Image: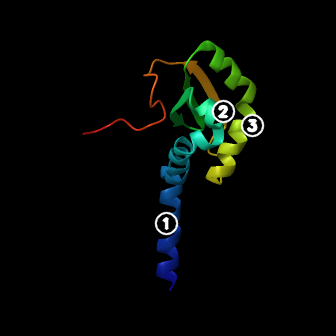
Amino acid sequence: MKKMDRAGNILERVLKSLELGQKMDEVRALSVWPEAAGPRVAANTRAVSVIRGRMLVETKSPIWAQECLLLKERIREKLNRLVGSEAVKDITFKVGSFPESGMNQKPDTK
């Protein structure tokens, strides 16, 4: 039983050192962006990445970047609530270039 306890402790330390839990939460934050942002914001933005707790979101225009800045804390809190952890510590908004339709959809791989 003691060997199993030690193996479990070692495995737990290895997983923590790799930060796999944090990385999985960051991926989940990307997937729940449309729900956290709401339909109007989600239709004009695209969550691009989360690295070390900082989410990068591209917006359709400078006006949308400004609008999102005003909503940033509310969206961040909702993201973390949906994910179940403090995966997103900050959100950066920048104007991006992407097609008008299907901005929050996965690319077609056919």
State how far apart marks 1 and 2 are (Cα).
Answer: 32 Å
Relative to 5, is 40 above or below?
A: above
Element at badge 2? Answer: strand
Left or right: where 73 falls relative to 41: right
Name the residue: 44% across, 37% down. 105
Q: Earlier in the sequence, mark 3 or mark 1?
A: 1
Q: Earlier in the sequence, mark 1 or mark 2?
A: 1
Mark toward the viewer: 3 or 1:
3
State how far apart marks 3 and 1 are (Cα).
Answer: 38 Å
Q: Residues within 10 Å of mark 2 (few under 14, many from 20)?
A: some
| Residue 14 x %, y % | 48, 58
Residue furthest toward the top?
62
Q: Residues within 10 Å of mark 1 (few under 14, many from 20)?
A: few
Name the residue: 46% across, 22% down. 100
Name the residue: 73% across, 29% down. 71
Q: Which residue is mark 2?
A: 90
Where residue 37 sits, quadrant-wise, is: top right
Q: Which residue is mark 3?
A: 74
Element at badge 1? Answer: helix
Name the residue: 66% across, 33% down. 90
Amino acid identity at mark 1: Ile
Q: Earlier in the sequence, mark 3 or mark 2?
A: 3
